[in-house]
Image (tube, rainbow, N blue to C red):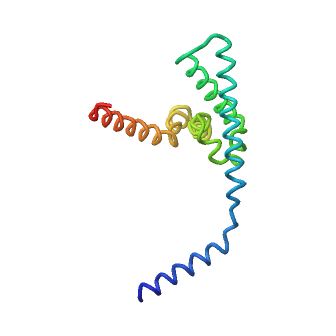
Amino acid sequence: MTEKELARRSENYLKYVNSFAPPTKHFLTCGRAFMIGGFICTLGQFFRFMLELAGLSGDVLAGTVSVILIFLGTLLTGLGVYDRIGKQAGAGSIVPITGFANSVASPAIEFKTEGYVYGMAAKMFLVAGPILVFGVSAGTAVGIVYYLLGL
């Protein structure tokens, strides 16, 4: 079989498979992700402004806003609301810090029936664990490179 025949068969197969797949609505999906993700970020900015008025500043302000958003993401996950938001928002609900809270809380809730130690505690970082490991590793590597370059 020649390369042209293989390419033609591959192209025909892709056309066949795509004929069964429903068309995606890219602009609608991106628009919803933008709007809902933007709303989550706007909510965080609202908390930031309110806490600034209360007298917080600097790292304490940033930490408090992060804790509030993580708490809300975990609470909404526990109530089953964040999953419905995620179905509509896609990446718009995953990118903010509330999405990280959801990725930690969801497996913990799912495996709660297996017990607190072997279920909830062990499975809590099932999704978020690799993100933490690779994030810390990448941050360390970048820090070493910056240190070696003298930046």
Say which quarter of the image contains residue 141.
Answer: top left
Q: Position of residue 123 (x, y in %)?
A: 52, 39
Q: Position of residue 11 (x, y in %)?
A: 54, 79
Left or right: residue 97 versus residue 151 is: right
Point 63% across, 10% down: residue: 55
Q: For the view shown, which residue lies furthest in the front direction? A: 151
Q: Position of residue 10 (x, y in %)?
A: 51, 79
Point 66% across, 16% down: residue: 51
Left or right: residue 46 versus residue 115 is: right
Rendered position, 14 above or below 125 = below
Say which quarter of the image contains residue 142.
Answer: top left
Left or right: residue 6 versus residue 101 is: left
Number of marks in picture: 0
Point 70% across, 41% down: residue: 36
Q: For the view shown, which residue lies furthest in the left direction? A: 148
Q: Position of residue 28 (x, y in %)?
A: 72, 54
Rendered position, 46 above or below 100 = above
Looking at the figure, which quarter contains the C terminus?
A: top left
Looking at the figure, which quarter contains the N terminus?
A: bottom left
Say which quarter of the image contains residue 70.
Answer: top right
Point 69% across, 53% down: residue: 29
